Image (cartoon, rainbow, N blue to C red):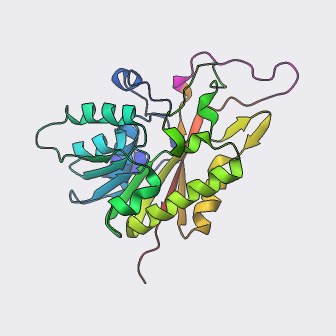
């Protein structure tokens, strides 16, 4: 990475990342574009030998990005349909790219599948509680469940229980991350039934409590993807159209 690119990536708001037409066709309810994990991989790994993990792999954007950059990608995905789509994407990778490893498994089994202290970087976007089973607020677009079965955290009704269970998975992540390794988590704040849930700060507090260092925060500006915004709450209660997400940057403490 040259100095000009380093400076551009260091901006606290990223507004130049969007899904491609092909990525939109994958129809995952919370897919992030390959360009997002690719940038994070460039920022937080220097070696082509680096191992990149996504415990909520979805259709494999993080693993595809890792492979294109010559890194070894490992992922877990609960939903068989999304795992199958990920493998279809892997088949299109160049022959010289490292082959990603994707387990169709519950993220809570991470330590059974990935050795301790073996991962250089985690890039992931966990379930957004059960919000994805409803309608997207800003532009009325329909969204869908992850369809992951009984192990799907998106089916947990209580927000506090959801945070606790998600925190438990990140304890697993902490154990497989190398000391000093980074963990980048893409999340969005939520509103349900008139109540606001500051998911990004709640999750940051949960992970900090479990031993992670909260290292930094980037805003991912997605305004360009929302083309049919409506006046939420008009004319009685003013509501904010959320057109950004947060990239929470954590680190496992380095060895003394």
Range of magenta residues: 224-238
- The one of 220 and 135 positioned closer to us in this rendering: 135
Task: Identify the residue at horizontal 63%, vertical 34% (top origin).
Answer: 131
Q: In the rendering, at what x and y percent does residue 63 appear?
A: 31, 44
Asked whether residue 116 is drawn in magenta, I would say: no
Image spot of residue 209 (x, y percent): 62, 68
Residue 217 drawn at (x, y percent): 55, 53
Quadrant occupied by the C terminus: bottom left
Any part of residue 219 in sight: no
The outermost residue toward the bottom is 256
Residue occupying image coordinates x 37% and y 26% = 23
Can residue 228 be found in the magenta stretch?
A: yes
Q: Name the residue located 26 percent from the left edge and 59 percent from the top edge.
A: 50
Q: Furthest-top residue in view? A: 228
Give 221 or 49, whichever is nearer the viewer.
49
From the image, give the main secondary structure of the stretch colored magenta. Answer: loop
- Residue at the limit of the structure toward the right, as seen here: 236
Left or right: 26, with 192 as reference point: left
């Amino acid at each position: 990475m040259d100095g000009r690119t380093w400076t551009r990536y260091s901006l606290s708001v990223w507004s130049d990342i969007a899904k491609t037409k092909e990525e939109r066709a994958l129809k995952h309810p919370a897919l992030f574009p390959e360009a997002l994990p690719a940038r994070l991989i460039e920022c937080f790994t220097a070696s082509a030998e680096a191992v990149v993990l996504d415990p909520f792999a979805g259709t494999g954007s993080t693993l595809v990005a890792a492979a294109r950059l010559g890194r070894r990608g490992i992922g877990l995905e609960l939903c068989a349909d999304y795992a199958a789509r990920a493998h279809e994407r892997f088949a299109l990778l160049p022959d010289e790219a490292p082959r990603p490893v994707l387990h169709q498994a519950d993220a809570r089994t991470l330590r059974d599948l990935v050795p301790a202290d073996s991962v250089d970087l985690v890039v992931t976007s966990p379930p957004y509680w059960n919000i994805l089973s409803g309608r997207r607020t800003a532009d009325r677009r329909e969204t869908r469940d992850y369809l992951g079965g009984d192990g799907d955290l998106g089916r947990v009704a209580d927000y506090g229980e959801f945070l606790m269970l998600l925190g438990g998975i990140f304890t697993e992540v902490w154990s497989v991350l190398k000391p000093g390794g980074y963990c980048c988590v893409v999340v969005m704040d939520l509103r349900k039934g008139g109540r606001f849930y500051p998911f990004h700060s709640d999750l940051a507090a949960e992970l900090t409590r479990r031993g992670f260092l909260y290292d930094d925060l980037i805003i991912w500006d997605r305004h360009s993807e929302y083309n049919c915004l409506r006046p939420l709450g008009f004319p009685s209660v003013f509501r904010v159209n959320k057109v950004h997400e947060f990239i929470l940057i954590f680190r496992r403490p380095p060895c003394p």
